[in-house]
């Protein structure tokens, strides 16, 4: 029987309703709810649960799977345009990004933000490093070549957060390998970059109160506690304590041990 004009057209039950996908996966406010699934194409996907549904993202390439202008992303396209401009003209002068282009780059960066946040929760730290480094390149490109001052500056507010996420991911990779000193160096370098950022914009005091800086400083403290003890420094500390307690025989033994190991004996 034909439906009457104006009567709603209903899709069959096997249609686009996402409720079956969400069944058993409730939204939890205040948490980042993500999972990895296998797509119909056989490749892994990331799903992020939202209050009204979900986001599904590709693991590699642009999160939505698009290839703008045949490139992996708009950023890659504009970086290629910049390189071509330099080759033709021998300089970067004259290359620019319009407000519309900058907005498109910001929209694309938001996709990568959702993905690197999801990857962090899933423990894919190499993916986090890749996507955060990529979004830092967006900030640099817009900051250098945007026509409008607002477009040059609007993404800068996110730099401390991206630096923090990048450093946490890189340091965690090193911690898993027990490369504690390398992990600590990564965190310290990120803190220095963050401090320079606040100084650049005349807000050095804000650096001390920055949530991102506080998190990295706490991470640095935790890493320092895991550093292996330097045997020579430990001997020198014990020597100083023995001298202070006037345990001269113990102090003499420790001096001999330090000298034997080629260290410098303090008094």
Image: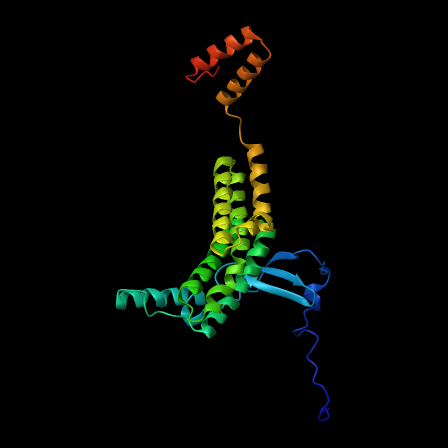
Q: Position of residue 23 (x, y in %)?
A: 72, 63
Image quadrant containing the N terminus: bottom right
Front one among 188 and 135: 188
Q: Position of residue 64 (x, y in %)?
A: 53, 66
Horizontally, residue 255 falls left or right of residue 213, namely left
Q: Position of residue 201 (x, y in %)?
A: 49, 57
Could you tell me which residue is drawn at 51 percent across and 12 percent down?
A: 254
Q: Is residue 43 visible?
A: no
Q: Position of residue 237 (x, y in %)?
A: 54, 20
Front one among 234 and 67: 234
Could you tell me which residue is drawn at 57 percent across and 16 percent down?
A: 241
Say above or below: 131 vs 262.
below
Front one among 189 and 27: 189
**Farthest residue toward the bottom?**
5
Could you tell me which residue is drawn at 61 percent across and 52 percent down?
A: 121
Q: Quadrant of residue 221?
A: top right
Q: Is residue 207 visible?
A: yes
């Amino acid at each position: 029987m034909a439906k009457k004009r104006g009567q709603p057209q209903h899709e069959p039950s096997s249609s686009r309703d996402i409720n079956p996908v969400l069944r058993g996966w409730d939204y939890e406010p205040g948490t980042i709810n993500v999972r990895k699934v296998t797509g119909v194409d056989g490749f892994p996907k990331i799903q992020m649960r939202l209050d009204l549904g979900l986001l599904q993202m590709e693991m590699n390439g642009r999160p939505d799977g698009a290839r703008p202008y045949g490139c992996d992303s708009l950023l890659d396209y504009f970086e290629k345009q910049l390189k071509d401009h330099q080759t033709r003209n021998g300089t970067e002068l004259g290359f620019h990004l319009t407000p519309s282009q900058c907005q498109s780059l910001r929209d694309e960066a938001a996709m990568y933000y959702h993905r690197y946040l999801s990857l962090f929760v899933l423990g894919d730290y190499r993916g986090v490093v890749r996507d955060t480094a990529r979004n830092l390149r967006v900030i640099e490109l817009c900051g250098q070549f945007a026509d409008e001052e607002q477009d040059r500056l609007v993404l800068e507010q996110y730099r401390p957060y991206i630096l923090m996420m990048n450093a946490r991911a890189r340091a965690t990779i090193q911690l898993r390998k027990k490369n504690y000193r390398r992990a600590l160096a990564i965190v310290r370098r990120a803190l220095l970059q963050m401090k320079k950022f606040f100084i650049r914009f005349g807000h050095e005091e804000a650096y001390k109160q920055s949530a991102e800086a506080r998190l990295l400083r706490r991470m640095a403290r935790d890493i320092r506690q895991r550093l292996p003890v330097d045997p020579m420094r430990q001997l020198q500390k014990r020597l100083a304590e023995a001298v202070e307690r006037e345990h001269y025989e113990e102090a003499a033994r420790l001096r001999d041990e330090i000298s034997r190991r080629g260290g410098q004996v303090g008094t």
